[in-house]
Image: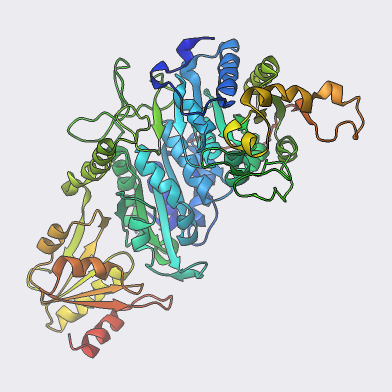
Amino acid sequence: MSEKMVLMQGNEAVAEGAIAAGVRFYAGYPITPSSEVAETMAKRMPEVGGTFIQMEDEIASIMAIVGASLAGKKVLTATSGPGFSLMQEGLGYACMVEAPIVILDSMRYGPSTGMATKVSQMDLMQTRWGTHGDHWVIVLSPSSVEESYQLTIRAVNLAEKYRNPVIVLSDETISHLREPIDISIPPVLVERRLPTAKADYLPYRTDESLVPTVANVGTGFRTSCTGLVHGESGFQTANGHVAEALVERLRDKLFNNLDDIIQFETDRVEDADVLFMSFGITARGVSEAVETLRSHGRKAGSLRFITLFPFDDDRVRKAAGNARTIVVPELNSGQLVLLVKRVFGDSRKVVPMNKINGDLISPQEILNFLREENL
Amino acid sequence: MRLDLLRSERLPNIWCPGCGNGIVLRALLEAIDQLQLDPDNVVLVSGIGCSSRAPAYTAFDNVHSLHGRAIPVATGIKLANPDLTVIVVTGDGDSSAIGGNHLIHAARRDVDITVVVFNNYNYGMTGGQASPLTPTSSITTTTPNGMLDRPFDLVKLAAGAGATYVARSGIYFAKHLVDHLKKAIAHDGFSLVDAVAQCPTYFGRFNRKGSAGQMVTSQKDWMVLKSVAEKKTPEELAGKVIIGEFVNIERHAPVSAAAPKEQA
């Protein structure tokens, strides 16, 4: 291990990544397997001049970080499935008032209390559709401790840049994994755009970026925000045209910038005849399986989703090469595969591979699966 | 009253004729004005309901949050910028039902915010349903045969949870209300004012309380000043609501076990 490397747990890496990205406010509620984020932040926030508060539940946690965000802080909360369910109303509110917030959801086995210490990838669709109403979030998926650190920094930057909630979708295994990581390179930080002139200030007026320059509360702009449909003034309206324009803008401010937001990692896609599409911890088993298959002469490849949402069909299609068979291994009963099937229809053979017993998918299981399914 | 504390362009308000919310809002603005607070440093945070629309009529920074969630939002704002005066505008249902957990924990933490409860004993915006402050036997749309449960005593609830300033007043006693709002806002620590208003459209109509004017003036019959109540017997106070200051104590001053080490 070089001098620059430090041994860190996945949850610690999220906390340290957040601090490196400028997060100075953390509110949360204990829940396995994310509690180490809160514990790390409880110790670290006072050391860096930030604020840690343990709230009475996850509803309060997300609303407290929204409040601190509206007052200008970069903010984080961390939770797992049951707590993430409670945060859904706050997530929708943050989308609507365009408060930059970052949420770590470390997936455990569900539904309900499920198995608190067992891994799953069962929250994928909850990140996208958990709260009511048309809305758009950015979801990033780390598959290592190093990436937990780097993607948390990226999550904070994207939240500030687009004034939108960003979810770091990790899982029990990555949260509790310990790996050496390099944190020596200072990150590039992104600051939210703020209004400059108080005259004619309208919090939700936008330029071509479609990202508003909402003033932080307490800075003399006399700003307004509401979860009700609102126009540029930030005040409620029931005008259907204003509503339509608002919801379209909430989408377009992200979808006009997909090159900036969407990241994949691909491995030997070009000549692959069997391609794995996966995310998070499952991609690590895929990686070794691809190596083994290649060493046996099988043209296997991998596409790992680093950005899960926004999910852009065209980019996935272009990144997928010409493999006739696409296998989608995931630790749920089939969530990512729904999106992959949407992209490819009947043009490729899309095969789900699911494991729902609380254990990981091993490389050997992937090899066995190909053999058993004659793929 | 200073009209520049209102956003006149947002008026008229959404409240029904005879609603008491405007009088509570006026009292709140009077209190802020008399305390000579810099309007740039005042943030009004609300939840959902009739009363929670009040901040949007004011010229301060205003955050209209979710049902019951104004207090955690206010907590986040206050901790992020302790120089601000953060006031929660809420209703009886918003604060004591869906937001009840947040209320008691903010009181326990003694976070330095002020909660002003516009208490009209029912959910007005959704059509006059029962709230946790609806008196027993009262008729509402969800208690057509009369409220079976006992209401919270919001003053005792806040005091029991650790609030360091708690008062109750009614809109008939306009100066009393302004004075106690002033003390609550100036108080260093968690403060709550139970501001009793009227909902003639629903609660008043269902319970034959008369006109809005009669509902307001009747407060002098069923509300008793705390100083007067202290000389009365429990029998004499049956059915009365006591108004005044109930808690006014030093802020909870925690001592950290180990002062944090400053480092970059």
Give the camera-side residue of A274 and B15.
B15
A333 to B148, vertically: above or below: below
B79 to A363, vertically: above or below: above
Give the camera-side residue of B252 and A18.
B252
Where's the N terminus of chain A, which quadrant? bottom left
Q: Position of residue A260 (x, y in %)?
A: 19, 46
Q: Which residue is pictured at 43% across the width and 69% down the height?
A: A119
Q: Is residue B155 visible?
A: yes
Give the camera-side residue of B91 and A312.
B91
In this picture, residue B252 sits left or right of residue A305: right
Q: Position of residue B147 (x, y in %)?
A: 70, 48
Where's the C terminus of chain A, which quadrant? bottom left
Place residue A174 in its image quadrant: bottom left
A141 to B249, vertically: above or below: below
Q: Which residue is pictured at 10% across the width and 73% down the height?
A: A347
Q: Which residue is pictured at 81% across the width and 35% down the height?
A: B239
Q: Position of residue B171 (x, y in %)?
A: 66, 22
Q: Position of residue B35 (x, y in %)?
A: 60, 13
Give the camera-side residue of A203 and A182.
A203
Q: Is residue A4 visible?
A: no
In this picture, residue B251 sits left or right of residue A328: right
